[in-house]
Image (tube, rainbow, N blue to C red):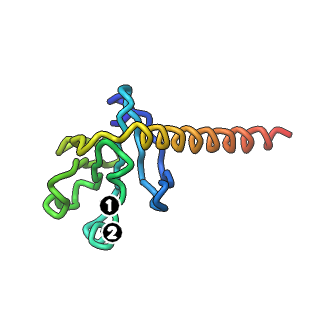
Amino acid sequence: MLTEMGFAALAELSLANGRRADLTAIGKDGSIWIIEIKSSAEDLRADNKWRDYEDFCDAFAFATLPDVPQSIFPEEVGFIVADNFGAEIIVQPSEHKKLSAARRKAMMLRIARAASQRLMTAEWAATSDKL
């Protein structure tokens, strides 16, 4: 879904505050979304740190499975339902605030460095089998 919308996503990105975002995505316009994935109602109840992500993105959303009730999620953020076949935005993630230029630059560098390191690690692993 994110790819179809023109986003490039990176899973499990460590943030400067020590938290780790499930999905961080950059839009064609440079907007940064963080999506926190919750597999159950218990998963959401056990996790009250989601507000710690808001300072690192332009928009925030939860994503979950079809059988997890939407009513347990905060109404002020985006909401996505996903399964093995695709995903649908139920509540559009709204830009709660624009990141400052300094924070945006720091996030772009963090995303680029993490993606680059993961690509290099994958390439090394692929070529080491051939040596």
What residue sits 25% from the left and 68% below the top?
41
- Residue 100: which quarter of the image? top left
What residue sits 67% from the left and 42% below the top?
122
Which residue is the site of mark 2? 47
Q: Please determine whether, in this image, residue 121 is positioned above or below residue 73.
A: above
Left or right of residue 99: residue 97: left
Residue 111: x percent and y percent? Answer: 51, 42
Element class at badge 1: helix
Residue 65: x percent and y percent? Answer: 28, 55
What residue sits 32% from the left and 61% below the top?
50
Look at label 2 and name its amino acid: Asp
Residue 114: x percent and y percent? Answer: 57, 44
> Nearest the camera: 52 or 87?
52
Instruction: Tell me how many marks there are.
Output: 2
Which residue is the site of mark 1? 50
Residue 88's mark? none
Q: Residue furthest right?
A: 131
Look at label 1 and name its amino acid: Trp
Left or right of residue 83: residue 127: right
